[in-house]
Image: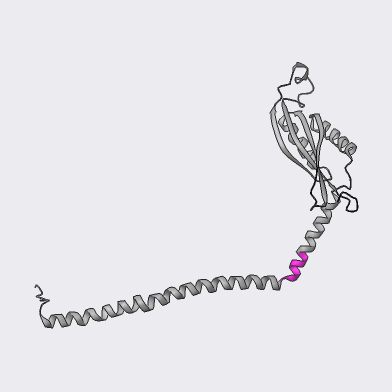
Amino acid sequence: MAINFDIKDPKNQRILASFLVPVVICYAFFHFIIKPRLDELNTKKAEVVQLKKKVNDIKKKLEQPEALNEEKAILEDKYKELEKLLPSKEDVAVLLDQFAMIENDSKVYMVGFEATETVDDGSKLYRANKYRLTIESGFHQFARFMSNIMSLPRILSFSDLNISLNTELDESMEIQEGLENQPRTLKIECTLTTYVFKDLNDGDS
């Protein structure tokens, strides 16, 4: 059965208006009154979360001064231990003796050792002495050499590493019987840096 609804009928218009007007009022009330308040509330909630996090971080720092002091003491102790590894002066003869022993143990050929520069940063308590090393060896032998160098009881660092095939290799340098574990197929050039404490009482500092 079809429903005959005449929109032009005043009675039907009143019925339709009585339904639509509350809907429009509710929509307008939500869109212009409630929704802006909800958006503002969400923004405030996000701000509160951020403020709570900042407050909690501050509370943790204030509640743990002893932990911070202990951490500071540990770092100071570590720094003092590192200081012990920095000599008061560079003894090149001792350094070369150590390198000679490591050279024999690592089965490499150290064919070049040259002091290149001393770097003195006025803001630091140490000088950096740089040496250019040239080594002929196999890859594994050089890796052992570096490991042994870094195991020395002092602070050292490698930089500017350049590895290439040893084009200067000739028949007299070829692997011979009994020296199979001591190849020299690679030519390795690198910079070794050692660190020495500055004398704060001398005229250079």
Residue 169 coordinates in the image, percent (x, y): 74, 20
Q: Residue 182 falls in which quadrant of the image?
A: top right
Task: Name the foreground residue: 7 vs 108.
Answer: 7
Colour pattern = one colour
Q: Residue at x 78, y 33 (%)?
A: 133
Task: Name the foreground residue: 195 vs 145.
Answer: 195
| Residue sticking out furthest to the front | 203
Position of the N terminus, as image quadrant, is bottom left
Dominant secondary structure, magenta: helix
Please give left or right for residue 36 compared with residue 159 in the image: left
Residue 141 coordinates in the image, percent (x, y): 75, 32
Residue 103 coordinates in the image, percent (x, y): 82, 32
Q: Residue 172 falls in which quadrant of the image?
A: top right
Q: Is residue 107 magenta?
A: no
Q: Residue at x 77, y 63 (%)?
A: 72
Q: Residue at x 75, y 16 (%)?
A: 171
Q: Using the image, determine if residue 167 lies above or below residue 76.
A: above
Q: Is residue 176 visible?
A: no
Span colored in magenta: 64-70
Residue 82 coordinates in the image, percent (x, y): 82, 52
Q: Residue at x 77, y 65 (%)?
A: 70
Q: Using the image, determine if residue 120 lies above or below residue 44.
A: above
| Residue sticking out furthest to the top | 171
